[in-house]
Amino acid sequence: MVDGDPLGSTLAKLSPSDPLVCGILSQPGRGIQLNAGAVIARSTRLLFLHADVLLPQNALVKLCRVLDHYAAGAFDLEINATCLSLRWISRVASLRSRLTRVPYGDQAIFMNRDTFDALGGFADIPIMEDVVFMRRLKKQQIPISILRDRALISARRWETEGILRCTLRNWLLLGLFTWGYSPHQLAKWYRPPQQPLGASRPSEL
């Protein structure tokens, strides 16, 4: 697990008796944190899991089978809510990733280490690192697989900020990034003013 909070607030939640989990501090920024996790990982297969996302049942077994045949992959997305609008957003997001072949980090992206190394890892940017990486895979015509099993993401952000506002903001940020806006500027608009830069803390397994 990689914690981008200098105070280590996420690492403090780890059980000290769990030998399977290694926790480290890094500079804030999702790309930086993801790369830091990959450096200490010892497996030939990498899974990048955001701290607010839960894996589907038997996810590790299934992704290992996928990586026997594909360079990378991800899961479909499900927002953890009963609200019909959020369920619709989940389905649209999953369909989008299948059509574009560019899944987002919330979908628990996984890949073989040689693929990760060949592309130089994630860009050291605070946001859109997942989009940059997957677009590079697509540009090089490297096939990926998107499993229909659903990664479960917390609905807290939509519930706190408002479903319409949060969704439109996400679409706008992606559009601005595509048009050439800096990820560093976009990151300031993505996080609520009261949230510190390191508050969005992906973890890697």
Image (cartoon, rainbow, N blue to C red):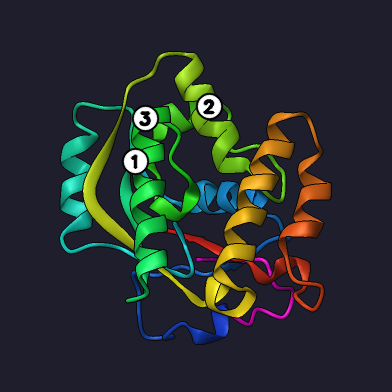
Looking at the rendered structure, the kind of residue marked 2 is Arg
Q: What span is colored magenta in the figure?
A: 1-9
Residue wearing tag 2? 135
Q: Is residue 8 magenta?
A: yes
Disc 2 or 3, which lies upstream in sequence?
A: 3
Left or right of residue 185: residue 40: left
Mark 2–mark 3 distance (CA, rounded to whole Å): 13 Å
Quadrant occupied by the C terminus: bottom left
Are the residues at dot 2 and dot 3 in contact (C-beta closer than 8 Å)?
no
Q: Nearer the observer, disc 2 or disc 3?
A: 3
Describe the element under mark 2 as helix, strand or loop.
helix
Mark 1–mark 2 distance (CA, rounded to whole Å): 17 Å
Front-lying residue, 40 or 67: 67
Mark 3–mark 1 distance (CA, rounded to whole Å): 6 Å
Q: Is residue 33 magenta?
A: no
Disc 1 or 2, which lies upstream in sequence?
A: 1
Looking at the rendered structure, the kind of residue marked 1 is Leu
Residue wearing tag 1? 95
Residue wearing tag 3? 99
Residue 114 % position (x, y): 41, 28
Describe the element under mark 3 as helix, strand or loop.
helix
